[in-house]
Image: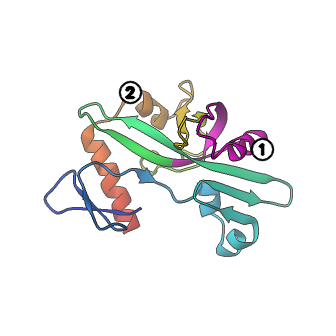
Amino acid sequence: MFWKRKKNKSTEFKCSECEKTHAEWPALAFNSPVNYHNLSENEKSEIGKLETDFCEIHYEDQTDRFIRVTLTQKVNDTCENLEYGLWVSLSEKNYSDYKVNFNNPNHETGYFGWLCSNIAEYGDTSSIPCDVMTKKGNDRPEIFPHKDFDHPFVRDYYNGILKKEAENRIYEMIKNVG
């Protein structure tokens, strides 16, 4: 989903898909894991499989598996949070369990995963270890970066960011999409 800032309004965005204006911040979503994004078009069609919530890359010697997840970033000087739509890689066993239970509204469990989305403000954020927690009701799983992993993104996740920084991230993503 692409969003455009409405002129003279700091927190209103016009959605390019539904054409409606929204007062809340948009989620910063990534269409695919960085591993898939970095494939050539030929590789995407030959070894990749991208769906809305699942992605697989079938190499000769291994298969990489990814699921779409959410992350909620605390914003310290406002009552809003910044939402992300990200991707993580899972082991074959955990990926299979998640896929089998994808439509089960009572499935609650946790997995270990690696972040597979690069958040521009932090440089390389792929390969940050995360706990992946599924939720009742079939909402996308939420991730929690491992607190002991030394990375600015992890520190900001636990310490929060300022509203100005959150809005700058939204505007940068809009600028880079549009």
Secondary element at tag 1? helix
Q: Residue at x 64, y 62 (%)?
A: 50
Q: Which amino acid does label 1 sit on?
A: Glu
State the image coordinates of residue 44 (x, y, percent, origin top left): 68, 69
Residue identified by numbered label 2: 159
State the image coordinates of residue 81 (x, y, percent, origin top left): 33, 38
Which residue is at the far right? Answer: 61
State the image coordinates of residue 103 (x, y, percent, origin top left): 63, 46
Which residue is at the far left? Answer: 8
Q: Which residue is drawn at 66% across and 50% down?
A: 66
Q: Which amino acid does label 2 sit on?
A: Asn
Secondary element at tag 2? helix
State the image coordinates of residue 36 (x, y, percent, origin top left): 64, 60
The segment highlighted magenta reads: 86-115
Q: Which label is found at residue 83?
A: none
Q: Residues within 10 Å of mark 2 (few under 14, many from 20)?
A: few
Ranked by sequence position, the earlier of labels 1 and 2 is 1
- Nearest to the eye among marks 1 and 2: give it: 1
Q: How crowded is mark 1: few (under 14 residues within 10 Å), some or many (20 or more)?
A: few
Q: In which quarter of the image is the N terminus?
A: bottom left
Q: Does the magenta stretch include residue 155?
A: no
Q: Is residue 123 visible in this depiction of the protein?
A: no
Residue identified by numbered label 1: 92
